[in-house]
Image (spheres, rainbow, N blue to C red):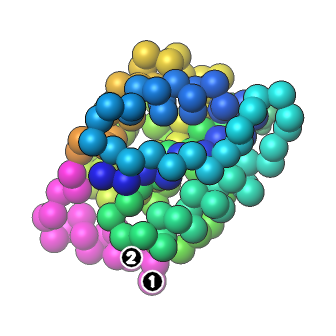
Amino acid sequence: MEIYIGSDHAGYKLKQAVKKHLEGKEIKVTDLGSFESEESVDYPIIAREVCEKVLEYPNTMGIMICGTGQGSAMACNRHKGIRAALCNTTYLAEMARKHNYANVLCMGERTTEEPLALEIVDKFLETKPDTEERHKKRVDMFDK
Ligand code: RB5
């Protein structure tokens, strides 16, 4: 599995924790920044980097973290082919993968405690899309 991860300054600490959490698992994680928490960074710029990689390399996924996750999700969803889901529960992460075929997970460092965020990451990455026709048909409608 291959993941592209990014954050702005407000998501930097949680991004580092997610990277550490994924270390040692069979997941290749590429960090696209921000590389520090002190300097303010515009989240749409990092979101673009993450989305461009996910779109370029099939079967990869993205994780984007900012203060709330909200701006990240909005920015990511401007990219055709990206299905970004803002998740603050494991149920949302599971359903975003199963029914909405989400390929980017967005979270907020200011809104989700680290232990829960790590559970959300695991749920998102381990859940496979439901291949039932009704879900596929609806997801296909996004890009039409
Ligand atoms: C940065 O202060 C904050 O606005 C950003 O991280 C994010 O929460 C936006 O949605």
Residue 104: x and y, percent? 46, 52
Q: Residue at 29% x, 35% y: name it.
A: 25
Disc 2 crowd rating (10 Å Cα; few below 14, some 14-19, many 20+) is few
Depth check, front residue: 23 or 139: 23
Judged from the image, the secondary structure of the residue bearing numbered disc 2 is: helix
Q: Is residue 60 above or below residue 95?
A: below
Q: Answer whether labels 2 and 1 touch (C-beta < 8 Å).
A: yes
Q: Name the residue under label 2.
A: 141
Q: In this view, does 55 lie above or below 29?
A: below
**Outermost residue, left direction?**
132
Q: Mark 1 points at which residue?
A: 144
Dividing the image into four equal quarters, which quarter contains ligand 1? top right
Judged from the image, the secondary structure of the residue bearing numbered disc 1 is: loop
Quadrant of the rendering where the C terminus is positioned:
bottom left
Amino acid type, label 2: Met
Report if residue 71 is visible in the image: no
Q: Residue at 33% x, 64% y: name it.
A: 59
Q: Classify residue 142 as left or right of residue 67.
A: left
Give the magenta-colored segment's residue range: 128-144
Depth check, front residue: 4 or 127: 4
